[in-house]
Amino acid sequence: MIYITGDCHGDYRRFSTENFPEQKKMTREDFVIVCGDFGYWDHSKEQEWQRKWLSEKPFTLLWVDGNHENYDMLAELPVEDWHGGKIQHIRENVIHLMRGQVYELDGIRLFAFGGARSHDIHGGILDPDDPDFRRKYRTLRRAGAWFRVNHVSWWKEEMPDEAEFEEGRRNLERAGWQVDFIVTHCTASSTQVLAGGPLYQPDALTDYLEEIRQKCRYRKWFFGHYHDNRNVTEKDLMLYEQIIRIV
Ligand SMILES: [Fe+2]
């Protein structure tokens, strides 16, 4: 079985047995995929407790990264090979699917590519090393501005680099540009237009995903980031709290 859902932002209540009773029939050979903004933020007691709770689930939880993850913490984790692609273990059954990887899961071929540009940063990004940091922080706080702090609530790695783009192309080339499922956080530029009209601006990542969309044959493409559950086309599905079964 493979289930899939959208952004969690560190809130995993949807995976309780009460909200997701299907897990009673699942084993670690069955998967639940999160389309980014999983909520890998810090080593706080609360987050450690949540990760322990997830580690006791009967299924294997797979997630691509979103724009809100702690990329400094992710960089500390070893990279391993798993089902044909690179991953990082958060717990034995909680696995980070890395950008540009193709995985084979029980005859299903899946392409993963996380990351997205943050929309909620109109107030700017503050640098904690800035001598004027405290004053700027207070001013923005008081103004109710949408801002973030570098290495605390924002990381430049939310956007992929050229090496990651190339890695994706190389792995798709090896897969003959044909997969069953694509799992990302944001989506291709043209899908974004269909999803939100002029609300969302294209960027280097959505343009890259557009290139993938044009070139790669796929059955379904699942993405998060836009905080809604909607079939944008027959093949392109936006997910948020809904958990749907795909295999
Ligand atoms: Fe999100």
Image (spheres, grey):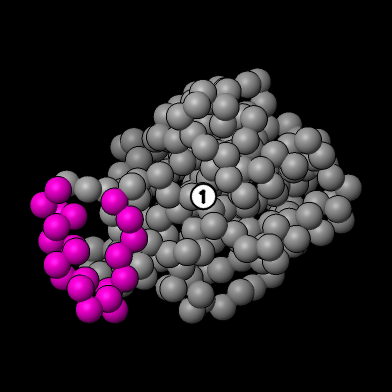
| Residue 98 position within the rendered picture, expressed as x and y whole percent measured from the top left | 61, 61
Disc 1 packing (10 Å; few <14; some 14–19; many ≥20): many
On the rendered structure, is 168 left or right of 61?
right
Compared with 70, 120 (above or below) is above
Q: Which residue is mark 1?
A: 116
Examine the rendering and report whether any part of residue 68 can be seen.
Answer: yes
Where, by quadrant of the figure, is residue 206 drawn?
Answer: top right
Is residue 186 shown in magenta? no
Along the line of sight, the residue nearer the viewer: 118 or 107:
118
Residue 10 x/y as whole percent: 33, 53
Q: Which residues are magenta?
A: 123-143
Position of 240 with respect to 215 (left or right) is left
Quarter holding the N terminus?
top right
Q: 147 left or right of 6?
A: left
Q: Nearer the viewer, residue 223 or 32?
A: 223
Residue at the spot x=50%, y=26% of the render?
198
Quadrant containing the C terminus is top right
Which residue lies most toward the front here? 132
